[in-house]
């Protein structure tokens, strides 16, 4: 009996610590969602209902993230940073099975986005992609294209003379 009591007591203590940790990690304004809950699970379920987006809303967020990510990089954003964000958006879009990343759609979106700052990459990949159909199992993986662009960008940067990398421009008013 004493062993079972100690085990039970340690479980109750752990649950109370978990309850306290949950309440410590949320803001004061959101404590209202944890009041009146008998269990930690009930607290977490209430918080989830309040803050977790619905599946449809999350799918919409992922689609918007993909659409923003596949645009050519904005001024001041390095290509490697842009590619990292693009890969993350792509992975989420694949997880949600968005049509924008099915077949060759993502591939052609990447060549369109790169046409302005690396036309040779864009042109070469467009030519290669014309050989494949949407369902062709031999089509190149999208991430291979991204990795190739990343490596080409690094190679081009390494060939630039050091003085060209740190040039300053005179401001005119």
Image (tube, helix red, strand yellow):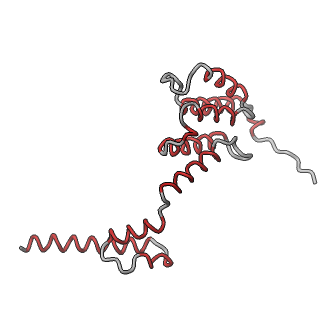
Q: State the residue in front, 33 or 82.
A: 33
Q: Is residue 152 left or right of residue 99?
A: right
Q: Residue at x 63, y 31 (%)?
A: 108
Q: Position of residue 24 (x, y in %)?
A: 42, 74
Q: Is residue 147 left or right of residue 30?
A: right
* Numbered disc total: 0
Q: Quadrant of the N terminus?
A: bottom left
From this view, report whether residue 160 is shown above or below residue 138. Answer: below
Q: State the residue in front, 96 or 145.
A: 96
Q: Residue at x 54, y 44 (%)?
A: 88
Write down the quadrant of residue 161 in the picture.
top right
Write down the quadrant of residue 130 in the picture.
top right
Q: Residue at x 53, y 57 (%)?
A: 57
Q: Residue at x 17, y 72 (%)?
A: 8
Q: Position of residue 40 (x, y in %)?
A: 32, 71
Query: Which residue is farthest left?
Result: 1
Q: State the residue in front, 41 or 56.
A: 56
Q: Position of residue 170 (x, y in %)?
A: 88, 47
Query: Which residue is farthest top?
Result: 131
From this view, report whether residue 50 is shown above or below residue 92. Answer: below
Q: Position of residue 54 (x, y in %)?
A: 48, 59
Q: State the residue in front, 155 or 109.
A: 109
From this view, report whether residue 46 is shown above or below residue 135. Answer: below
Write down the quadrant of residue 163 in the picture.
top right
Q: Quadrant of the C terminus?
A: bottom right
């Amino acid at each position: 009996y004493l062993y079972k009591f100690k085990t039970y007591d340690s479980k109750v203590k752990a649950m109370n610590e978990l309850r306290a940790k949950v309440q410590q990690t949320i803001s004061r304004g959101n404590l209202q969602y944890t009041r009146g809950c008998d269990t930690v699970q009930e607290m977490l379920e209430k918080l989830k209902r309040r803050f977790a987006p619905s599946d449809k809303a999350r799918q919409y967020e992922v689609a918007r993230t993909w659409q923003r990510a596949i645009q050519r990089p904005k001024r001041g954003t390095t290509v490697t940073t842009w590619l990292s964000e693009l890969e993350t958006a792509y992975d989420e879009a694949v997880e949600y099975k968005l049509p924008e990343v099915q077949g060759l759609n993502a591939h052609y979106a990447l060549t369109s986005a790169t046409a302005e700052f690396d036309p040779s990459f864009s042109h070469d990949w467009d030519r290669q992609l014309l050989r494949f159909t949407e369902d062709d199992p031999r089509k190149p993986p999208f991430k291979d294209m991204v990795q190739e662009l990343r490596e080409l960008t690094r190679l081009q940067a390494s060939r630039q003379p050091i003085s060209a990398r740190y040039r300053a421009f005179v401001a005119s008013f």
